[in-house]
Image (cartoon, rainbow, N blue to C red):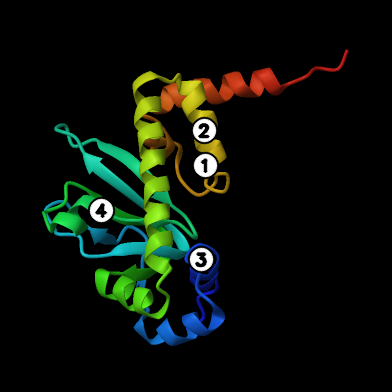
Amino acid sequence: MELPNFKKYLIEKGGLSETDYFQIQSFISLKSVSKSDFLLKEGDVCSHFFFVEKGLLRLYALNEEGKENILQFATENWIVSDRGSVYFQEPSNYYIDAVEGTQVVMLDEGFINKVSEINTDFRRKNEYLLQKHIRQLYKRISQLLGASAKRRYLDFVSMYPDIMLRVPQWMIASYLGITPESLSRVRKSLAEENFKPNN
């Protein structure tokens, strides 16, 4: 099973050696997800973390009017999950589906325990990555509450530099918490600012 992105992630972020990785290969579970297929639906209990080896996922909720509010995109080398549902074993309030055909490594508590047995430093490094994720979530909440649409868009481009041509504009607008029309105005304004006419 060739999973270059996941292997690199475990070695660089998780502190595993090549030998460690070889030992855990048989415990790796890979799933192929077609475009628009779900990995999680509202009301289900989430039992996995999903590492994107190739493709694109999104995590979103539906409001009372049935409108999608996208909380996170997950491209290659990203992990997405409903952590609260996993930890507390409670029904999820979210959906996770594939924006395009995607290869996902399915990570559960059993896999994390097995890796931790092989490399005792892995759990500490995993905890560090979790805290970084929580910090990013706080930043995102703060932006949604107080940052301008322009600032939110620029930070989105910085966070997801390879995603602009992979998702429709309405999904980007949903993530930013603005309308597609507002997003068009922001992009037009930025284009005009960056345009330098020759004199």
1 or 4: tag closer to the N-terminus: 4
Residue 2, given in percent of the width and then of the height, sits at 51, 80
| Residue contact between numbered discs 2 and 1, judged by CB atoms under 8 Å | yes
Q: Which residue is mark 3?
A: 9
Q: Amino acid at mark 2?
A: Asp
3 or 2: tag closer to the N-terminus: 3
Give 193 or 83, whichever is nearer the viewer.
83
Q: Which residue is mark 2?
A: 155
> Which mark's residue is nearer the viewer, 4 or 2?
4
Q: How would you rate the neighbour count of disc 3 (Cα within 10 Å): few for under 14, some for 14-19, many for 20 or more?
A: some
Looking at the rendering, which quadrant does residue 8 occupy?
A: bottom right
Give the residue furthest to the right: 199
Q: Amino acid at mark 4?
A: Arg
Question: How far, Cα to Cα, is label 3 from label 2?
Answer: 24 Å
| Residue contact between numbered discs 4 and 3, judged by CB atoms under 8 Å | no
Q: Which mark is residue 83?
A: 4
1 or 3: tag closer to the N-terminus: 3
Give 108 or 156, whichever is nearer the viewer.
108
Q: Residue at x 36, y 73 (%)?
A: 116
Q: Which residue is mark 1?
A: 159
Residue 59 visible in this rendered orientation of the protein: yes
Question: How far, Cα to Cα, is label 2 from label 1?
Answer: 6 Å
